[in-house]
Every structure is written in structure tokens, then in C-alpha cells.
Image (spheres, helix red, strand yellow):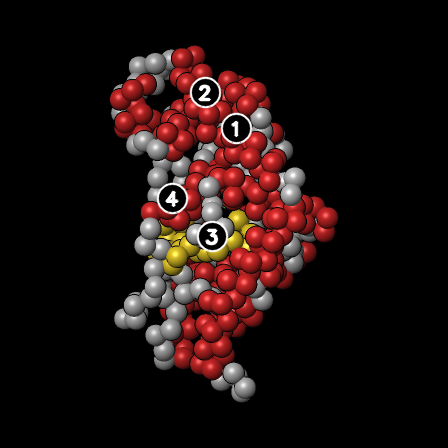
Amino acid sequence: MTDTTFTPRVFSGIQPSGGLTLGNYLGAMKRFVDMQNVGGFETVYCMVDLHAITVWQDPAALRQNTRELAAGFIASGIDPEKSILFNQSQVPEHAQLGWIFNCVARMGWMQRMTQWKDKAGKNSQNASLGLFGYPALMAADILIYHATHVPVGEDQKQHLELTRDIAAKFNNDFGVDFFPITEPVIEGAATRVMSLRNGSKKMSKSDPSDASRINMTDNADTIAKKIRKAKTDPEPLPESAEGLAERPEARNLVNIYAALADQSVDAVLAEVGGKQFGEFKPMLADLAVAKLAPISTEMARLMQDQAEIDRILARGAERGREIASPILKKTYEIVGMVGS
Ligand code: TYM
């Protein structure tokens, strides 16, 4: 733990690797908007293009996906005046601090990361070095802003624990109280949105079945159809959250409803407990369309003016550097870099 008081500052990032899903929206983006609007925090949000290239990205697609993700942030309610919004590569201090952290973090820490094991699979000798070091760059993203709070979905929890370990080891190695021990913010009904086809698998853009996920670019008809076809069980909905324990598909749909409606799971079940899915699914489809279709329409509108998106990102990068650059300079001084 540190004794220093840090400015309350939120940082989070999303990879521009194509296909923003309902999982990204409910687990991350919507909560980024809430933290922007709640007041009391500076909010910094980033399209992590350096992370995306840890696996192959076609350059033209990366450019397109970065702009589309920026449009997704803005359409979801991120106000580029209130929040700082940019793509990671344009604030070079991320990569510079990332290198320092490569020298702080240990191989064993990285080897334990479940995301590394999942992504590299059996063919780890052929994975990029960047994929292995991914969490050290992630720690740099957060700590280059001295961010105190990081809203993410459940799947990022282990990476955020590692961020805390890196901050603590740096502070300890150099005898300083310089980097904050960041708080993960993993809250709400939708920290782990599951596949619509399999309630024990995470909803993911890389699932081969498009029916398993709702994409933020899906139109109203597609959203409604995917919800109608979502896997369920034959029982009616329970009256309370405990009744969802052994029912992953039912739990997932109720969680999605609760997150979209900004209600607790218990409040939702007080309303829909006892109903059959034949009745609940159309309610969920209406709610999802009402909340998501305007976002996809606005994303498409924003994508018409790419020059404006590029201007917003360039301005965001400038503002990001204003915070990041003195923190990097101080880090270099601590480490002993002559000329810093
Ligand atoms: P990424 O791009 O995979 O996902 C972005 C955010 O979406 C959340 N998420 C989900 N939440 C709930 N249910 C799901 N099915 C679901 N799928 C994705 C993720 O938890 C995440 O919050 N390593 C990060 C990006 C990153 C980052 C950072 C995040 C890089 N640097 C610094 C926070 C701070 C990632 O790959 O997220």
C-alpha cells in the first residue's frame, strides 16, 4: 500500500481488434460512461492498438477498427470534452513505461496469466513476445496516468492483480512511494456476459458463431432475432437470484436485462419471476433494441466523418501526454536515466 494521495483518476482500454460486443458494452463501455458522469474522477479511455498487434492485424483493418471503436465510445456516451479519448500508440509514454515494467515483472508472473495460456495455447513457442509481455504494457497503460480506478470485466481481474504487483515491486525496488496500488472496479450485473448459445462460455468477438453474441453494429432486427433464438431452459424464471444458481443461460439473460435496465437482478426478478421465456425474451429484445439500436445508428453516423474522429483522437492524445509525460520523466529519474 502507499501513503501518497493520488488524484482520483479512471483509466481503461479496449482493443481495436474488430467487433465490439454486448459484453464489451455492458462489462466496460457503459460503466466507463457512468464513471465519466458520476463526477469526482478524471476519466481516461484508450483504444489499445499496441495490444491489438500482439496478434496479427491487417493494417487497413486496424485503422478502420480503431476509428469504429472511437465511434463506439462516443456513441455510447463518452464525451471527448469530459473524458480523454485516444489511441494508445499516439501517447508513446505507454510503450516507454512498458519497457521499464518489462524489466520489473518476472517471467513466472507472466507464465501464470490465464489469458496467455488461453491465447498462446499449445503453440506458445510461436506466439509473439508481445503477447507474453502484454500484461506489463497493460500495467503501464494504467500507471502512466497514476490511475486509481480501473473499470473492467471479470476476465481482466488477473491482469489488474499483476498491475498491483508491478506497482508494488517498482516502489519497493527503488524505495519510493510513486505508483498507486490501483483498484479494479468489477461491478454490476454484467461483469461476465456469456454466450447466447452456451451459458458457461464468455460472449466473445472471436466465437465462430455470430449467433452467440450481439455485436454493437447489429441492427434492431438482428438483435431481436438473436435474443429470440438464445438458448434457455424449460423452467419459468425464479423469484430470486438464488434460483438462477444452476441455470447459466437463464442467469445470463437476466443479468443482461438488469444491466441494460440499470436495475439489480433481484429487482428484475421481482418483476419477471414466474414468467416463461416465451414472455421474457420479447421483453428483453425490446429493451435491448431500445438501448442498443440508437448506439449502432449513431456509430454509423459518426463513421461518415472520419476526419472528425481523427481530430478527436489527436486532441485526446495531446491531453493524455500532458499527464503521462511528467510521470515518465519522474520514473526515468527514479530509475537513474541520465538526462531525465
Ligand atoms: P478487451 O478488448 O478484450 O475487452 C474490453 C473490455 O470489455 C470487457 N469484456 C467483457 N465484460 C463482460 N462480459 C464479457 N463477455 C466481456 N468481454 C469483454 C473486458 O473485461 C474489458 O474490460 N486487456 C484488455 C485491454 C486493456 C486494458 C488496459 C484494460 C489494455 N490495457 C488497461 C484496462 C486497463 C482487453 O483485452 O480488453
C-alpha gap between disc 4 and disc 3 = 15 Å
Q: Which residue is the site of mark 1?
A: 293
Q: Work out whether mark 1 precedes mark 2 in sequence or the reverse, and give the earlier one.
A: 2
C-alpha gap between disc 2 and disc 3 = 32 Å
For residue 120, say whether it is visible. Answer: no
Q: Badges 3 and 1: C-beta atoms under 8 Å apart? A: no
Judge by depth and name the residue closer to the eye, 304 or 233: 304
Residue 34 shows which numbered tag? 4
Residue 3 point in image, percent of width and height: 27, 71
Which quadrant would residue 146 be assigned to in this image? bottom left
Residue type, label 2: Asp
C-alpha gap between disc 1 and disc 2 = 10 Å
Residue type, label 1: Ala
Q: Which residue is the site of mark 3?
A: 81
Residue 133 point in image, percent of width and height: 56, 62
Q: Is residue 153 left or right of residue 54?
A: left
Judge by depth and name the residue closer to the eye, 277 or 84: 84
Q: Which residue is the site of mark 2?
A: 286
Q: Badges 1 and 4: C-beta atoms under 8 Å apart? A: no
Residue 285 point in image, percent of width and height: 47, 21
Q: Work out whether mark 2 precedes mark 4 in sequence or the reverse, and give the earlier one.
A: 4
